[in-house]
Amino acid sequence: MVLSKIASESDVSIHSTFASRYVRTSLPRFKMPENSIPKEAAYQIINDELMLDGNPRLNLASFVTTWMEPECDKLMMDSINKNYVDMDEYPVTTELQNRCVNMIAHLFNAPLEDGETAVGVGTVGSSEAIMLAGLAFKRKWQNKMKAQGKPYDKPNIVTGANVQVCWEKFARYFEVELKEVKLTDGYYVMNPEKAVEMVDENTICVAAILGSTLNGEFEDVKKLNDLLIEKNKETGWDTPIHVDAASGGFIAPFIYPELEWDFRLPLVKSINVSGHKYGLVYAGIGWVIWRNKEDLPDELIFHINYLGADQPTFTLNFSKGSSQVIAQYYQLIRLGYEGYKNVMENCQENARVLREGLEKTGRFDIVSKEVGVPLVAFSLKDNSKHDEFEISETLRRFGWIVPAYTMPPDAQHITVLRVVIREDFSRTLAERLVMDIAKVLHELDMLPARVKAKLAMAEEGAAANGSDSASHHKTDREWELEVTEAWKKFVANKKNKTKGVC
């Protein structure tokens, strides 16, 4: 008996997506489909493909928050349909943004009188915040040069070569020369002395990083401020400082309160910080705070009234969601100073556990500093057998996403791995990661290609020492047998270790 099946034109009566025709067709990649599909099928098929993404909690490359409390998740979903820019329609959301600006300004020791409103704005992240701060510096510098009757067409900005790519974007998009202080071996942040030497009359500001992306280190903003004050006195210039505190802005006030990096220093005119990093909010929120109103030229602020009332706006985009602003306010009042301090201390402690675990392997040099962003950057002491990129790639088999990268000029010959310790990275995970890294090292050491390379190196060493064993040059067959034997031993050892384990 021959069985046949005629597919239904519309599987409306079939409740299971996997019993429907929608799992038999490829998802559109270039053109919108002609016909609709059931919502259940659309959800299931997209959700299934998204399973191939990495696990955000195990993405140790990212500084961005990957966990928040369910209550905050609910607040965000409840406000996901509110447009942040509609200030007249959503006045409470606007008020929450203003409260966040004031709280962060006070956290950064802005010189505000009692009851005085801080000057700042919420952004989609530190990249937009840096663009806005940079535009303010450029416009102030241009106005000053025009008033003095001097050329104002060649502005520049001084940074370290370790800055995040958003600074390069700002320089290219807004036609500002980027003067970078090169890095050196063992010193992977901007050197304040070299930075001040590069300052000239056309420098709109010097950008200091509180928490380098490369190794988490805080740059010496206090020393930069003091050196720049002296140079300004000698030259008659008034070159200011911007602090890129994207990563460190929500760390330093809580665990390094005595560190002077913020508005306590007179030349610091603006600071940006990422709410979606150690501000503990999901991706999509940053902040930029100015020292006072004079540091933000009024001509950069637009006033609109077509949404219902006069609204001042200083952003690069217009519409965006309100959820992240509301979530930031939730975190500020939910955790308070005590809660943020506890979270940052936990991160710092778990970074210490990871650092000490890696040091005990005897295979790594630690590149990161203990004072700074809670992360661990490390490099192999000996990369002749395998390199950091191979470790990064092999760790993905265990679920870990650990980036490997080369340092910027003039330290580009240094390769490092980096693990960012976030709020949701526990001590148990830190200890597990060390164990998995040890497994990866062992496996890489025993790979056939590695075995052959090690045997070849041993033979060369024997030849250099005049050993008799080196007098005979091995044939390809002899190499094959030796590598096979070593590989058999490796496999046998693996079996013995897992015997009796289900």
Image (cartoon, grey):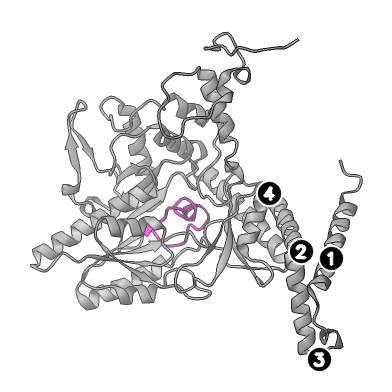
Q: Please tell me which of labels 2 and 3 falls first in the chain.
A: 2
Residue at image mark 2: 448
Disc assigned to residue 397: 4
Query: Mark 2 and mark 4: span between their CA atoms?
Result: 19 Å
Residue sitting at x 20%, y 44%: 301
Find out whether the residues at labels 2 and 3 contact each other: C-beta distance under 8 Å: no
Amino acid under disc 4? Arg
Structural crowding at the residue carrying mark 1, measured as other residues with C-alpha within 10 Å and reported as few (<14), some (14–19) or many (≥20): some
Q: On residue 486, which mark appears?
A: 1
Task: Name the amino acid, label 2.
Answer: Pro
Residue 315 at x, y = what percent?
27, 43
Q: Which callout, 2 or 4, points at the residue further toward the start of the chain? A: 4
Q: Residue at x 24, y 54 (%)?
A: 136
* Label 3 environment density (alpha carbons within 10 Å; few <14, some 14–19, many ≥20): few
The disc label shown at residue 466, or none: 3
The residues bearing labels 4 and 3 have C-alpha atoms spaced at a distance of: 43 Å
How far separated are the C-alphas under marks 1 and 4?
23 Å
Q: Which residues are magenta?
A: 243-262
